[in-house]
Image (spheres, rainbow, N blue to C red):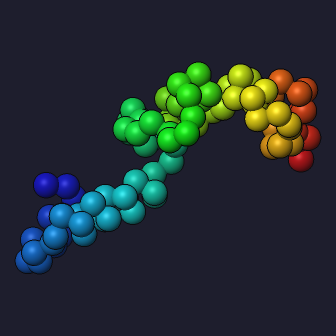
Amino acid sequence: MSDWQSHFTFLQLTDVTVRWLSKIRLLRQTPKTMPLRPPKKKIPGLANDDYYYTPEGFVVFTAAYHLRRGYCCKSGCLHCPYGFKKKEE
């Protein structure tokens, strides 16, 4: 039982409520304290070489994906094959 669950022992919480409360608790954590979780789902419509996940769980698109897309989105992507560099502000 987690800390927040011990405060609500008099309530009958549904599984959905427990999952929701767990997500809210995760949102309050900083990236350094967040638990690392492997991705659970493959992204539909993309090949395995189109993207990868960072240890923090972020999606990073590969240069191969950007080239197949055919244009630069000017978002400062890590593997931009078009040479766009986002300006530091």
Q: Residue at the spot x=39%, y=63% of the render?
A: 24
- The residue nearer to you, when weighing 30 against 83, is 83
Q: Is residue 12 visible from the viewing direction of this image?
A: yes
- The residue nearer to you, when weighing 61 against 8, is 61
Q: Quadrant of residue 25?
A: bottom left
Instruction: Tell me if residue 88 comes above or below residue 3 in the rendering.
Output: above
Judge from the rendering whether residue 76 lies leftward or rightward of residue 56; answer left or right. right
Q: Residue at the spot x=57%, y=34% of the render?
A: 46
- The residue nearer to you, when weighing 82 against 69, is 69
Q: Quadrant of residue 14?
A: bottom left
Q: Residue at the spot x=86%, y=42% of the render?
A: 74
Instruction: Tell me if residue 38 comes above or below residue 8 in the rendering.
Output: above
Q: Position of residue 28 (x, y in %)?
A: 46, 58
Q: Position of residue 11 (x, y in %)?
A: 11, 77
Q: Is residue 32 visible from the viewing direction of this image?
A: no
Q: Position of residue 86 (x, y in %)?
A: 87, 39
Q: Position of residue 39 (x, y in %)?
A: 42, 36
Judge from the rendering whether residue 35 lies leftward or rightward of residue 50; answer left or right. left
Instruction: Tell me if residue 58 comes above or below residue 13 in the rendering.
Output: above
Q: Which quadrant of the rendered structure holds the N terminus?
A: bottom left
Judge from the rendering whether residue 30 lies leftward or rightward of residue 5; answer left or right. right
Judge from the rendering whether residue 86 lies leftward or rightward of residue 64; answer left or right. right
Q: Residue at the spot x=82%, y=33% of the render?
A: 70
